[in-house]
Image (spheres, rainbow, N blue to C red):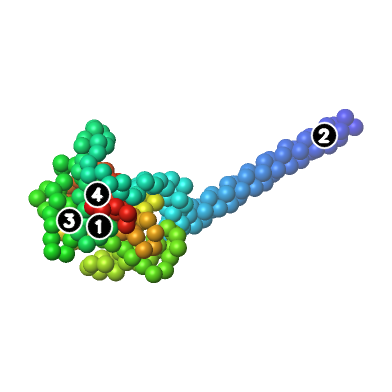
């Protein structure tokens, strides 16, 4: 009798061990499947967020969050021919130069050379190879900065050689930035909207070689911050 009881107990114990092993296998299988599903979901999410369209949307989201104004709110010329301003990290006396055939002018430092042409004024650096041009942009429609900027971006696309317009990363945080074009010779043109209203705005064009960008671009950005609109009440 005792032997029978022992045998029964042994059988029951064996069944419990086998059942426990099977449950462990099932749990491990479920856990592995769950990991696979999670990894696949993460992979799909990564692919979704890295499509060209999504990358562009993410880029715009970042730009919208970090936008700052390049030009100050005080855009109108006050009649002073020269003044002291901090430019390139030091205080300098700058003179105001009116741009021919426009209602705009700019306070410039001694780094910039002014060249008068029959059809306008150009600001030059490095023996004419790098330039600043201010192009009047007058339109009949558009009652806000946003509306005028959209039209200005279209102008940039159609202006000059048929090159692709790109938004360069180092300039995307400027609210007035319209885009850039680079030709096959490594010369880039950056465009910005100097907005007063739809009748009195301008497109600012910076032209320079990429090999000189690290030195030239900071200079140009500081200089164009001093562009001013010359109102009708100012006799310049």
Disc 3 marks which residue?
Answer: 122
Query: Which of marks 1 and 2 precedes in the sequence?
Result: 2
Spatial CA span between label 2 and label 1:
98 Å
Q: Position of residue 10 (x, y in %)?
A: 79, 34
Q: Please, is residue 231 above or below residue 221 in the view?
A: below
Q: What element carries label 3?
A: strand
Q: What element carries label 2?
A: helix
Disc 2 marks which residue?
Answer: 9
Query: Which of marks 3 and 1 precedes in the sequence?
Result: 3
Q: Position of residue 2 (x, y in %)?
A: 88, 30
Spatial CA span between label 2 and label 4:
100 Å
**Residue at image point 82% right, 34% down:** 9
Disc 4 marks which residue?
Answer: 106
Instruction: Give the numbered dot on residue 12.
Output: none
Instruction: Give the numbered dot on residue 134.
Output: 1
Instruction: Tell me the mark number nearer the camera, choosing from 2 and 4.
Output: 4
Q: Is mark 1 on a helix, strand or loop?
A: strand
Spatial CA span between label 1 and label 3:
8 Å
Spatial CA span between label 2 and label 3:
102 Å
Instruction: Tell me the mark number nearer the camera, choosing from 2 and 1.
Output: 1
Query: Which of marks 4 and 2 precedes in the sequence?
Result: 2
Instruction: Tell me the mark number nearer the camera, choosing from 4 and 3.
Output: 4
The answer to which of 192 and 185 lies nearer the viewer is 192
């Amino acid at each position: 009798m005792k032997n029978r009881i022992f045998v029964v107990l042994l059988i029951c114990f064996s069944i419990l061990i086998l059942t426990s092993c099977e449950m462990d296998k099932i749990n491990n299988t479920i856990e592995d499947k769950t990991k696979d599903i999670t990894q696949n979901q993460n992979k799909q999410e990564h692919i979704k967020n890295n499509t060209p369209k999504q990358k562009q949307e993410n880029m715009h989201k970042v730009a919208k969050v970090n936008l700052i104004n390049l030009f100050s709110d005080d855009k109108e010329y006050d009649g002073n021919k020269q003044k002291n301003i901090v430019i390139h990290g030091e205080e300098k006396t700058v003179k105001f130069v009116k741009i021919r055939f426009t209602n705009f002018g700019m306070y410039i430092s001694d780094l910039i050379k002014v060249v008068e042409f029959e059809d306008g004024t150009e600001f030059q650096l490095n023996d004419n190879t790098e330039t600043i041009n201010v192009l009047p942009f007058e339109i009949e429609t558009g009652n806000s900065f946003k509306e005028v900027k959209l039209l200005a971006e279209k102008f940039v696309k159609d202006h000059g050689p048929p090159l692709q317009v790109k938004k360069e990363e180092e300039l995307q945080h400027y609210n007035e930035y319209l885009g850039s074009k680079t030709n096959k010779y490594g010369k880039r043109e950056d465009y910005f909207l100097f907005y007063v209203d739809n009748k009195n705005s301008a497109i600012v064009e910076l032209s320079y070689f990429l090999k000189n960008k690290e030195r030239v671009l900071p200079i140009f950005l500081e200089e164009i911050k001093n562009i001013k609109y010359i109102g009708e009440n100012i006799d310049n």
